[in-house]
C-alpha cells in the first residue's frame, strides 16, 4: 500500500510540474537564418510559389484561400499539414508583406497561436533568409506541451529553412515577368 501512495505522489508531483511549466513558459520564441547562393528575387519567388511549398515545408499537403485579397495583407488561407499520419488544418492570415523583403503571418490551430515572419536580404549577390517565430499554446496543457517540445519545434524550422535553401538552389523555373506582365506593372 505504501508503494501505491509513493507512486501516486510521484505522479501528482509530475502533473504539478507539467502544469507549472505551462503557467511560467506560456510562449516560446526562436529565430533561424540561412544564406542561399541565388539572387533575392528568385529566393522570394520560390518561397511564395505554392507549387514548391511541399518541397520545403515538412508535412505540407496544400493551401486553400478562404478570404481577403490573395497573397496580400488580410489574406486568410487554410494550410493542410500531415504529421505522423495525423492531418491538421492551420489557419494562416497574412499580417504584413513587403515583396522581396518580408512576410508576416499568424497561424492559428486548435492547440496554438503562432506569429511568424520570414525576411530576405541581398548580401553580395547571395540571399540571407531569416525567420522569427513566437508560439503560444492555447491553455495550460498546450502551453506546457509547447515548452517541453520547444527544441523539437525549433528543429522543425531549421529543417524547413534547410529544405527551402535546397529547393531554391535546385530551382530551374524562370520567375522573370513576361513582357506583357512588365507592361501591366508600368501602367
Image: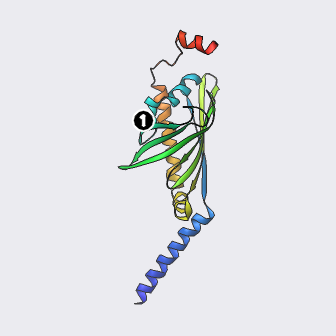
Drawn side of residue 86 relative to residue 186, left or right = left
Q: Is residue 72 visible?
A: yes
Drawn side of residue 122 relative to residue 155, left or right = right
Above or below residue 183? Residue 154 is below
Give the camera-side residue of 38 and 146. 146
Q: For the residue carrying disc 1, how many other residues have a C-alpha within 10 Å: few (<14), some (14-19), or many (20+)?
A: some
Determine the residue located farthest toward the bottom in the rendered image.
Answer: 1
Drawn side of residue 2 relative to residue 161, left or right = left
Above or below residue 70? Residue 136 is below
Give the camera-side residue of 103 and 152. 103
Percent x, y for residue 3? 41, 86
Which residue, given by chain and number where applicable, does mark 1 sit on?
Answer: 54
Which residue is drawn at the image coordinates 48% and 81% (left, top)? 9
Give the quadrant of residue 36.
top right
Counting labels gives 1
Task: Give the position of the C terminus as an image quadrant.
Answer: top right
Above or below residue 108? Residue 148 is below
Percent x, y for residue 181? 55, 14
Task: Give the position of the N terminus as an image quadrant.
Answer: bottom left
Which residue is drawn at the image coordinates 50% and 47% (left, top)? 155
Amino acid at each position: 500500500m505504501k508503494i501505491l501512495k509513493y507512486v501516486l505522489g510521484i505522479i501528482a508531483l509530475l502533473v504539478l510540474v507539467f502544469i507549472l511549466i505551462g503557467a511560467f513558459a506560456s510562449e516560446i520564441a526562436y529565430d533561424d537564418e540561412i544564406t542561399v547562393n541565388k539572387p533575392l528575387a528568385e529566393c522570394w519567388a520560390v518561397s511564395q510559389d505554392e507549387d514548391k511549398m511541399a518541397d520545403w515545408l515538412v508535412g505540407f499537403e496544400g493551401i486553400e484561400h478562404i478570404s481577403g485579397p490573395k497573397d496580400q495583407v488580410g489574406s486568410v488561407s487554410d494550410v493542410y499539414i500531415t504529421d505522423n499520419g495525423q492531418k491538421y488544418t492551420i489557419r494562416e492570415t497574412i499580417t504584413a508583406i513587403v515583396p522581396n523583403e518580408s512576410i508576416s503571418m499568424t497561424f492559428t490551430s486548435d492547440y496554438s497561436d503562432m506569429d511568424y515572419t520570414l525576411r530576405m536580404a541581398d548580401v553580395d549577390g547571395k540571399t540571407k533568409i531569416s525567420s522569427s517565430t513566437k508560439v503560444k499554446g492555447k491553455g495550460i496543457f498546450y502551453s506546457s506541451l509547447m515548452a517541453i517540445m520547444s527544441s523539437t519545434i525549433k528543429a522543425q524550422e531549421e529543417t524547413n529553412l534547410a529544405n527551402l535553401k535546397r529547393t531554391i538552389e535546385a530551382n530551374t523555373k524562370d520567375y522573370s515577368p513576361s513582357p506583357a506582365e512588365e507592361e501591366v506593372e508600368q501602367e
